[in-house]
Image (cartoon, grey):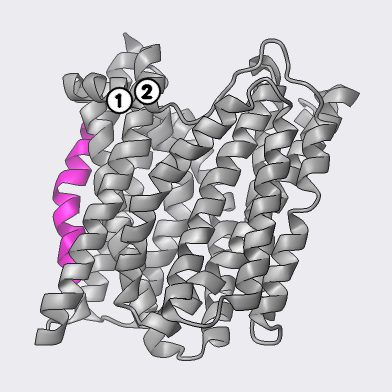
Amino acid sequence: MRPPVLFELSAAEKKKTALLFVYFFLVVAVFWIQKPLRTSRLLISGGIVALPWAKLLVAAVVMPALVIYDAVTRSLRKRPRAVLVSVCAGAFALGLAGFARYGRTSTAAAFAYYLFVDIFVTVMVALFWSLAHESTPPAQARRIYALVGAGGILGGVAGSAFTGWYAQTTPPETMLWTAAALLAPLPVLAWALGPPARDADDAGPDFQGAWHGARLTWASPYLLGIAAVVVLYEVSSNVVDYLFHALSLQAFAEQAVLASFLGRLNAVIIAASFLFQLILTSFLLRRRGPRDGLLILPAAFAAGSLLFLTAPTLAAAVLLFVSDGSLGYSVNQTSKETLYTPAALPAKYQAKAFIDMVLFRLAKAFSSLLIAAFNVWLLPRGWPLRTLSFVILFCLLFWVPAAATAGRSFDRLEEG
């Protein structure tokens, strides 16, 4: 029997794995502590109509934030990455302290906090992977990244569970101070990783490559299929997210109760995602490649949307939301990423950057505008929430053929 990966690592690799594991655990835990807090604060303060506008704000601001992050990263390229970690961790800790002190005063503050949390996770996760790639040669990465990634999953479970079980007994300010305190070890961990490895990658947002990737994507039916899967999933997922939070707000009118419900449910979803990734995803990729994996989430969305049409209850919305969270970040995500593996190097990097950084955010903005228009014009005229289920079903008319075609094309490329 092959020994576990951990026992095949050298002492230096075990140290690096432990440092990256703890770093990723802390970053993801801090995000998931905040996510239920920021969503419940926004919904209680501004109502469900505030949610699509907040997502539009995120779509408009996060990309410029990444451009700034990229510029700062390049200016500090000759300095230890730990300097940038110290600057970012300190800035976000100060931000958390500010929201703990002043963040409950208005709906505008709730919007600001919603945006802050998205910028936090976008920058800190990008910084983590830059740090990991910079310190880890490719051959070593193949041995340790699975273990490192498990740190993020456990951080998500721990952070969600913390908010889920303590939101009703602990003031939000205390939870934000706790999140700020969890950022304190990050500079120490970054310094302990030491200087960059000679043959490591320097990965970060590649905006120039993304625009080159636009031409590659439009010229390739295969890449257009991948882009269609990404865009149609994001539009559907945004609608699912809105329906779930609309019904949740109707059921839980107090911020602490709503935050507790969201935290506990998120902990269950992340744990289920981990199990799906460990069992179902690996089985499908070994036996069938990404083709079947790409069709599982559309099937779940079809069943959930039809159920919501006939019975628009919180239970039906939860089923849709759980399907998205548990399958979207495991089977669907991994299957989609696998589609890039037989492609040429420019497609793997430049086209992928365009699809993930540009088309993904455009899809999020478009679906948020669609939901905002529903709130402004149709909801006041008596159109029920279940109407939005037709948006998901309409997306599925194109999502399923695109996924099936991309899966068959993958098989041909791999064989050829």
User: Outermost residue toward the front?
Assistant: 75
Mark 2 closeness class: few <14, some 14–19, many ≥20 residues within 10 Å: few
* Amino acid bearing label 2: Gln
Q: Which residue is mark 2?
A: 208
* Residue 317, image x, y percentages: 35, 74
Residue at the spot x=9%, y=85% of the render? Answer: 381
Residue 155 quadrant: bottom right
* Amino acid bearing label 1: Trp
Q: Is residue 135 depicted above or below 69 in this figure?
A: above
Q: Nearer the viewer, residue 142 or 16?
A: 16
Q: Which residue is mark 1?
A: 211
Mark 1 closeness class: few <14, some 14–19, many ≥20 residues within 10 Å: some
Residue at the spot x=80%, y=30% of the render? Answer: 193
145 within the magenta span: no
| Residue segment shown in magenta | 388-405
Q: Is residue 406 depicted above or below 120 in this figure?
A: above
Residue at the spot x=26%, y=30% of the render? Answer: 406
In contact (CB < 8 Å): disc 2 and disc 1: yes
User: Outermost residue toward the right?
Assistant: 11
> What is the magenta segment's predominant secondary structure?
helix
Q: Nearer the viewer, residue 328 or 18?
A: 18
* Residue 132, image x, y percentages: 67, 30
Residue 192 horizontal side relative to residue 55, left or right = right
